[in-house]
Image (spheres, rainbow, N blue to C red):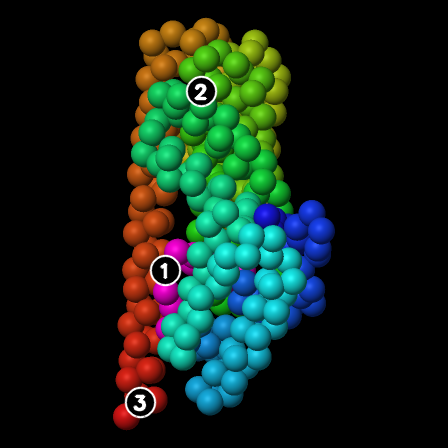
Amino acid sequence: MLRVELFGRFSACSEECRMPLRDGSKAQELLAYLLLNAGRPHTREIVASVLWDQCSTVASRAYLRKALWQLRSALERCDETSVPCLRVDSEWLQLCPGQAIWADVSVFEQAYREGRGVQGAYLEDGLAEAMEEAVELYGEGLLPNRYENWCLEERERFGHKYLAMRDQLMDYHLSRTRLEEAVEQGRQILLCDNSHERTHRRLMWLHHLRNDRTSALRQYDLCTAALKEELDVDPSEATSELYEKIRDEKVPTSIDKRASAMVAQSATDSLREFQVHLSGLQSSLADMERRLKSLLLELKT
């Protein structure tokens, strides 16, 4: 089986063969694009216009033919199943990984789909374990050394899914009173987005539940500094109010009903924020698709 990793540095190899694709090549980019959009057919025009968006139609189609030839040759050299996973004809192309290709992004996407919409406190242990494995795969994010427009959009999409799963896992561990694990999930979120105020606020509360008032108050200082440096804003009223309650020892130090309510509200806020962002992203993608279709119509007339 060919193992392809798109998180962090690109890697594609089987037990016997490292895929002969030059780092940064268009054939490598083509494989990444098809893996991220696997299981459905694509017109050559669309793929060519996305990957060679600065070129003319004639030139982009010629470049696509060359990249396809390189990719097919590389796949044939590393194929151990004798079942072709790349289907190509004069107008369409499609990657069908099946049992021939393992991809980290596919594992990540599956875990996200299975957990989508489930509050962290209600995750089944098996699903939580799959999500833990998925976020560990994420590493430095999707193809961090590529800056093509389509890749930037995909990287942002995966980044939000990563944060959403970390947030669910934070609730999952908290609901089982595994406070250290919940804190670690919050720290990982901040490594990705240090100005994520809600996570700072939840960490303040978690530190307090661990009877570590000093760390809880320090977390507020870290939050204040991050918001000022990255967004030039002050903490929200909710964060400042929690800080004052911790400082004055007016919040519970055990996971009681009020604590559970805080967890549930945090999860609801997280889902709502993500849904708003996803709606905006879907609108942008729809607009891009309309522009591409318009361009294709102009080229055919």
Q: Secondary structure at mark 3?
A: helix
Q: Is residue 149 left or right of residue 12?
A: left
Q: 51 left or right of 299?
A: right
Identify the residue shown where x is 43% and y is 9%: 255
Q: Is residue 219 left or right of residue 240?
A: right
Task: Indicate which disc residue 125 carries.
Answer: 2
Which disc number belongs to residue 40? 1
- Rounded to the nearest whole Å, what is the CA distance between mark 1 and mark 3? 24 Å
Residue at image coords 45%, 23%:
126
- The vertical placement of 225 against 64, above or below, is above
Counting from the top left corner in percent of width and height, residue 159 is at 49, 47
The stretch of residues the image draws in magenta is 32-43
Q: Earlier in the sequence, mark 2 or mark 1?
A: 1
Q: For label 2, count other residues whose C-alpha is less than 10 Å away and answer few (under 14), some (14-19) or many (20+).
A: few
* Mark found first going from the N terminus, 1 or 3: 1
| Residue highlighted by disc 3 | 300
Q: Is residue 232 visible?
A: no
Quadrant housing residue 284: bottom left
Residue 265, magenta (yes or no): no
Give the amino acid at mark 3: Lys
